[in-house]
Image: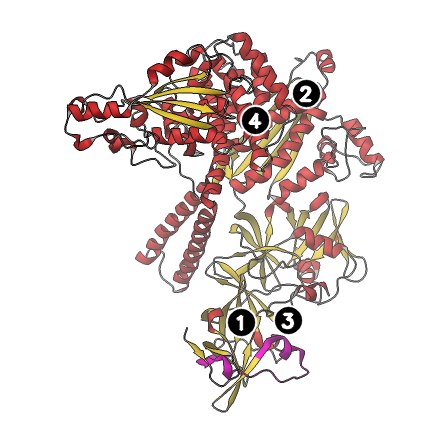
Amino acid sequence: MDALAAIRDVFFQECEEQLAELESGLLAMEGGDTDPETINAVFRAVHSIKGGAGAFSLEALIRFAHVFETALDEMRSGRLAASSDVLKIMLRAADVLADLVRAARADEDGQHPHAATLADELKAMSGQAGDSDETEEDWGDFEFQPMAAAMDAPEAAPAGPTGFKVTFKPRTDLYAKANEAALLLRELARVGTTEVELDAHDVPPLHEMDPEAAYLSWIITVTGDADEASIREVFEWVDGDCELTIEPIGGEAAGEDAGEAAFDLSALLARVQGDAPAEAAPEPEAPVAFEPIAEAPIAAPTPVVAAAPAPVTPPAAANEASADGPAGAGQRKSDAAAAGATIRVDLDRVDRLIDLVGELVINQAVLAQRVMEAGLARASAVAMGLDELEQLTREIQDSVMAIRAQPVKSVFQRMPRLVREVAAMTGKPVRLVTEGEGTEVDKTVIERLADPLTHMIRNAIDHGLESPEKRAAAGKPAEGVVRLSAAHRSGRIVIEVADDGGGINRERVKSIAIEKGLIGAEAALSDEEIDNLIFMPGFSTASEVSDISGRGVGMDVVRRSIQALGGRITITSRPGKGSTFTMSLPLTLAVLDGMVVSVEGQTLVAPITAIIETLQPKAEDVHSLGGHARVISIRGGFVPLIDVGMALGYRREPLPATQGVALLIEGEGGSRAALLCDAIQGQRQVVIKSLEANYRQVPGVAAATILGDGRVALILDIDTIVTVSRGDMRKAG
Amino acid sequence: MNQVISQNGQNHTGGMKELISFRIGAQEFCVDIMAIREIRGWTAATALPQSPSFVRGVINLRGAVLPIVDLASRLGFESTEANDRNVIIVAQIGEQVVGLLVDAVSDILTITDDMIQPTPDVASETAKTFVRGLIPMEGRMISLIGLERVLPDMELEAA
């Protein structure tokens, strides 16, 4: 059972990849890509999903994938033009397919609200384009022989015939690709009640027999619930490597075939015995379990789940051959040439490796410090060896981090669908342009990027872009453009969401902020400051809450989630030209840029993303508000001055402000405060270590890290420190 | 493990057990050796804010952040004056790894379960919380400590 669950897991993982492939292929075609390989890739993706779904009996998924595949095949064969309307439907179908896959993963093999309508649209499209529906199954086989073309309507009403006569004649290729006729027959028996007859007429005398050739064929009568599609599915993976006809019983052709097919085992036996000494009679008694001895070297060793693709087969066929019929489940390999050589590794193993390398780096630093302390000259052989070691460890660290890095493509890919949906809801035509999809960043960052990005793109379309009429009046093309781009910039990843809409209406933003009491009525703000008001908690520009972006969260939530990732978000806006949101994020969550400070003999690290500036408090700027509460005046405004040593309980008496250094920070919700420390030691990148793993959460401390001297330093949780200090006097101790 | 079936009619089994004994002041304690990962010398710990006094702070144990519990203070004695002669017993408690600061490790004892005598009913809360039993050994008394509640509880935090 566990093995099956594991295969199922792999199947769904691959489904995600196939879906991504599908969507990017369709989008490329929408963008004018006419490469036949693109449509082939798209087709393969749907076909693979369908195949895997078949193995797990995911009915709703199979049905929809089948219709989708049929339509795609029409397009592939050139009978259906890849017009933009057609592609739009295809894209929506891809969305539905993705939903169905997800539903299946969550074990709800139910109905999708749009599946039926889209299936009809797809059918209508493929129907118009031609009636040779049968070819749908032969996608990968360019030497298809139209054996089955006699049949109409693959989705024939199941109520029709009472049974089918299946003639199945494997070609040599079928065995060469490690398929196994007996397994197919066994699988067929699962579809309905079968009666199998072996047709051995073609078996030559033993001395003429080619040991690798296929001579046998079978005639199977299937009765019961089976419909043609499910029978066809059994042979899906060997399509093209066998001659296959499926006829409803009672059909015109049935009679003659039946007569001809009657097979007399004893007659054959007699022939064989007559021709040669019966030392190697190739037939066991039961035809179903028949394994031609001649084929044994190829076929017999691999009646197992994952047959590797035969290396000589062309890519398209390889895809088929790699999954061995019924049991072949999720083992298909995506096109090896396109995907490059990759392996799947358990994330825990990678993380363990990253941990170990982190320890190596720390150890190396400790060692270097010890060597310095020992008074060895910098030019000594030991010190030089250490330098080399340091370089190596850095390189190892970078390479290991790169394992976790993934292209942002995986999250960018979800956006076209979102844009389509929001565009449909708002009635604004939108084109999404993505750039830098290959930019790599830590997997965890990618995962946590999806929500804020979704929100920002919704916002860009709903609030950023004007209505088509307004755009026309402004002399802009009716179709709005939302640009999503990613790039590496000075050790961080910068992601931009830009729209070519009307820009921020500063008058309105300001009046709303005043109305909501976020700023004073006569506050003099620069344009930039006004733009940034939209990040204030409780700010929402839409006067009525719209269905799309008004979900009770505003840009403040976006900003908070970006900050939680150690990032910053800014906005630039030009009236009439549009707005650009720029997010700058660390490449990994495992390290953090920190300001190392000392407080009462303790070394602490403050995340640099929160720090706006550092300053030396002057006596005249610091004012006491009674008790230990102090404020500091910075350029005319007052912000609370928080003694970090007091807040963390390291000391009982506050440090005189002039003896320390203040870090001006901006916490959650944009509130500012100055943190008073004893001294600043410097900036450095630190590896984040969990405190909770062996202990528990400590208020005011976000995590820990290990410094070059091997000691543990605490990373400050600035928001908590500010909140705690803001509350009334903390209980001492 | 050698299972020794006791023949004295009380119908209980007495498995062999190995314990590590250590000193805190004049007292001797022991813990099950199976919970112990390693024993190491004292290194200065980084103090943790908002923590009970028996939590000395955290140290770096080959890249992991390890909390150090002053066992003397935890058990209600005078807290240990940490110096180079002290040792840290690194113990696995459930999913967590914790360092226990003690004066010195003295011995490895092999005992059978029936050598453990129940803790007499004394008023001390700490005794009830930590002492699992008493082992008489060559005229001395060694308290068997249970480590499950060495780390501060959540209730303490809420207080």
Q: Is residue A10 left or right of residue A451?
A: left
Q: Which mark is residue A424?
A: 2
Which residues fall within the magenta stretch?
B103-132
| Tag 4 near tag 3, CB within 8 Å | no
Q: Which residue is mark 3?
A: B53
Task: Using the rendered image of the protein, determine whether residue A414 is visible from the camera's viewpoint.
Answer: no
Q: Are marks 2 and 3 on the same chain?
A: no
Q: Are marks 4 and 3 on the same chain?
A: no
Q: Nearer the viewer, mark 1 or mark 2?
A: 2
Classify 10 Å Cα crowding around label 3: few (below 14), some (14-19), many (20 and above). Answer: some
> Which one is nearer the viewer's eye here, A536 or A183?
A183
| Tag 1 near tag 2, CB within 8 Å | no
The alpha-carbon separation of the residues under discs 1 and 2 comes to 63 Å
| Tag 2 near tag 3, CB within 8 Å | no
Q: Is residue A198 left or right of residue A731?
A: left
Decide: is A586 above or below A579. below
> Which one is nearer the viewer's eye here, B4 or A191?
A191
Q: Which residue is mark 4?
A: A97
Q: Is residue A184 magenta?
A: no
Position of the C terminus of chain A, as image quadrant, is: bottom right
Q: Which mark is residue B100?
A: 1
Residue A541 picture location, percent across and down: 77, 30
**Residue type at mark 1?**
Leu
